Amino acid sequence: MRIGIIGGGVAGLAAAYDLTAQGHYAEVFEVAPFLGGQASTFPVGGGQLERAYHHLFVSDTAITDLIHELGLGDKLAWLESKVGLYHQGRIWDFSTPMDLLRFKPLSLWQRLRVGLWTLRLQRTADYRRFEDVTARDWISRHMGSKAYQVLFEPLLRGKFGDHYDQVSMTWLWGKVRLRVASRGKALQKERLGYPMGSFGEVIDTLAQRIQQQGGHVHTSARVNRVLLSSDNQDQSDESETATGLEVQLKDANPENREYDAVIATTPSYVFTRLVPPMPEEYQKLLTGVNYLSAVLMVLELDRPLTPKYWLNIADQDMPFVAIIEHTNMIDKSLYGGKHIVYISNYPDRNSDLYRMEPEDLLELFIPHLRKLNPAFDRSWVQHYHHHRVDGAQPIISKNYGQRIPPHRTPVNRLYLANTTQIFPEDRGTNYSIRMGRQIAQMVMNDTNPE
Ligand SMILES: Cc1cc2nc3c(=O)[nH]c(=O)nc-3n(C[C@H](O)[C@H](O)[C@H](O)COP(=O)(O)OP(=O)(O)OC[C@H]3O[C@@H](n4cnc5c(N)ncnc54)[C@H](O)[C@@H]3O)c2cc1C
């Protein structure tokens, strides 16, 4: 069987890996000049660094299994994460449940209430009871409005910007369950995983394996459209079937390639441009989801900014929502001794923050970095990098679970596998890999049923 795959992120690559391992021919087309999509890397100080901060949770078994399968298991490190919360001019520790008990901006009763309800959330296995309530309403009702404003609203704003009050409680439930799974025993500190050769090494190894197994992986290769049976005038069959792809490889003219099945891993708003309008119900599911972009400023500093790996910013006057100081978890020697700091935001594509030029954005951030460390000086910044990631975060609103498009599209042999279909967990490399492998299996079952 020949399978065309749109997108060289981890979902597309994982699907191609399993299909080629089973003796099928898979060809991956990635429009960017590099592989990895949202988890891609770029060179910094002699090492490779993710364009957007990346780590793994202990519960991320799909990706850790794959890393071991690729022979990179000994590169996977599990390291203690140092989490903090910036609130009213001070950085508070937030790594263990004890840190919550010491968090003075909330009264002792409020802290206990948060602790008790967090425990209940962790023990609740069925997410469906949270589907028709927003995180704002649920948290305010159970943990109190002060706890919501101080602890949770900044987290929601951090991930969903102005859409923070639409986010379903299911999303927050998923986050709370995940963080606990990464902590092991109740009072232990959280451990996060990182492949020490970077996510880039995992992605490159995956691509090499696909090629060794007989497949092909192309970069700078745009898919213009999915070819359908109705494109072929001789076809009398009424139901549409995917028959191939119109692709454009670097500097070449567009050409048609034939496949027995096609897997698309692009965001839904890209997918709708590659196919004619789908039947109304499916089309509504594709167009009904809204995404936020991510804007990352990556600083290479000559010294540390804060002592934290992950710092949530609970201050709406600050023009960023989180600071991830990568080298407070990963040894700076991997990056030529530079201290790596990500400044993170999830804006709409039409916002000023999204459109700003990198140098203006840096100047905007600098006075606020001094609030986190009064000694900070512009001269500490040796280099900086600016990345925009579109389609970074689908907005998970109430009853989201009922609005997910199925992987099998209304077109025969055309499959969709993108981050909007990851639920109830929050999107992540682990789940895209799990999904890519599931879709590969689905394609094999559909085309060759027992
Ligand atoms: C800021 C940020 C931080 C994150 N942090 C973490 C983390 O700590 N841990 C974690 O596990 N995950 C994290 N993630 C999420 C994780 O990176 C993604 O969930 C995962 O990489 C998505 O993989 P994917 O293959 O499903 O999609 P993508 O990576 O989006 O891949 C889709 C690919 O399709 C390509 N494409 C689009 N149109 C075309 C076309 N016409 N032709 C050819 N190719 C096309 C795109 O260029 C892209 O490479 C983070 C994401 C962001 C944005």
Image (cartoon, helix red, strand yellow):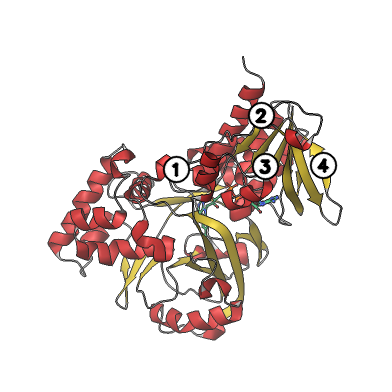
Instruction: Provide the secondary structure element on which disc 3 rests.
Output: helix
Q: Earlier in the sequence, mark 4 or mark 2?
A: 2
Query: Disc 1 designates what residue?
Result: 403
Q: Earlier in the sequence, mark 4 or mark 1?
A: 4
Q: Is mark 3 within 8 Å of ligand 1?
A: no
Residue at the location (71% across, 50% down)?
A: 30
Q: For the N terminus, give its image quadrant.
A: top right
Circle 3 Cα neighbour tier, 10 Å, few/some/many (<14 / 14–19 / ≥20):
many
Instruction: Provide the secondary structure element on which disc 1 rests.
Output: helix
Place of residue 259 in the rendered image (x, y in percent of width and height, measured from the top left): 76, 33
Where 20 falls versus 47 (above or below)? above
Q: Nearer the viewer, residue 144 or 116?
A: 144
Q: Earlier in the sequence, mark 1 or mark 2?
A: 2
Mark 1 or 2: in front is 2
Mark 1 or 3: in front is 1
- Give, as a three-letter code, the residue at label 3: Leu
Residue at the location (63% across, 52% down)?
A: 270
Circle 4 Cα neighbour tier, 10 Å, few/some/many (<14 / 14–19 / ≥20):
some
Question: Distance from label 2 to label 3 (Cα)?
Answer: 35 Å
Residue 239 badge: 2
- Give, as a three-letter code, the residue at label 1: Arg
Mark 4 or 2: in front is 2
Residue 256 badge: 4
Query: Disc 3 designates what residue?
Result: 206
Q: Are marks 4 and 1 in contact (CB under 8 Å)?
A: no
Horizontal side of residue 262 vs 119, given as left or right: right
Circle 2 Cα neighbour tier, 10 Å, few/some/many (<14 / 14–19 / ≥20):
few
Instruction: Provide the secondary structure element on which disc 4 rests.
Output: strand
Question: Distance from label 1 to label 3 (Cα)?
Answer: 32 Å
Instruction: Provide the secondary structure element on which disc 2 rests.
Output: loop
